[in-house]
Image (cartoon, rainbow, N blue to C red):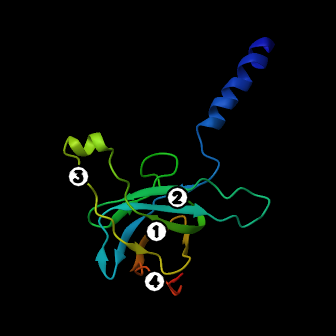
Amino acid sequence: MKTWCVVWLPLVLLAAGCSKSEFEVTDVQGVCVCNGTPIQAGWIQFSPIAEDAKKMPGKPAIGEIQEDGTFRLSTYAKGDGAVVGKHRIRISEPSMPEPDEIAQGAAVPQKHHCKLPKELILEVKLGDANHFVIELVPKSKGKASRRRSYEG
């Protein structure tokens, strides 16, 4: 019996420890809009911010922005949400399909040409309805160069 405990008990404890994540997650969803209109594609990322410099803040959550502007975040499993705490938010343009996928009829997503107006930090709370409206602004057009022309 003692041999069984020495061999199997650590394995059972290890397996039990692997089944739970180190950080608590909760459902997070929302909508991304630009000038009041939902953006139709892209990605949103919630990156946890460490409250204590000595502690790891947790794994980032990511969600695909749907055609109606909505998103649902995933961290460890599809749709499980984000780590509880403060997060820095990032938005990215939709990814382009591979050329062979386009040749087979895959839709080419429209870029939304919008950005966050400034750094955005949101707090995900346990037990709360974590439904966020992310307000974006149009990206500014390229500024004209102030460089004088060179005439040699």
Kind of residue indicated by mark 4: Lys
Residues at marks 2 and 1 touching, judged by CB atoms closer than 8 Å: yes
Q: Nearer the viewer, mark 4 or mark 2?
A: 4
Q: Position of residue 59 (x, y in %)?
A: 60, 53
User: For the residues marked 3 and 1, what is the alpha-carbon distance in whole angstroms?
Assistant: 31 Å
Residue 130 is labelled as 1
Residue type at numbered disc 2: Ala
First in residue order: circle 3 vs circle 4? 3
Q: Quadrant of the C terminus?
A: bottom right
Q: Position of residue 123 (x, y in %)?
A: 56, 71
Q: Nearer the viewer, mark 1 or mark 4?
A: 4
Number of numbered discs present? 4
Asked whether disc 3 touches disc 2, contact meaning CB atoms under 8 Å apart, the reply is no
Q: Residue at x 58, y 62 (%)?
A: 47
The residue type indicated by label 1 comes to Asn
> Dot 2: within a 10 Å radius of its alpha carbon, few (fewer than 14), some, or many (20 or more) residues?
many
Q: Nearer the viewer, mark 3 or mark 1?
A: 3
Q: Of helix, strand and loop, which one carries label 3? A: loop
Q: Nearer the viewer, residue 72 or 68?
A: 68
User: Residue 67 versus residue 55: which sits nearer the camera?
Assistant: 67
Q: Residues within 10 Å of mark 3 (few under 14, many from 20)?
A: few
Residue for badge 4:
143
Name the mark nearer the viewer: 2 or 1. 2
> Of 125 and 50, which appears nearest the observer?
50
Can you identify the residue that label 3 sits on?
107
Depth check, mark 3 against mark 2: the one in front is: 3
In x, y percent, where is residue 113?
Answer: 37, 72
The three-letter code of the residue at mark 3 reads: Ala
Q: Is residue 103 above or below residue 93?
A: above
**Disc 3 or 1, which lies upstream in sequence?**
3
Lateral position of residue 26 relative to residue 133, left or right = right
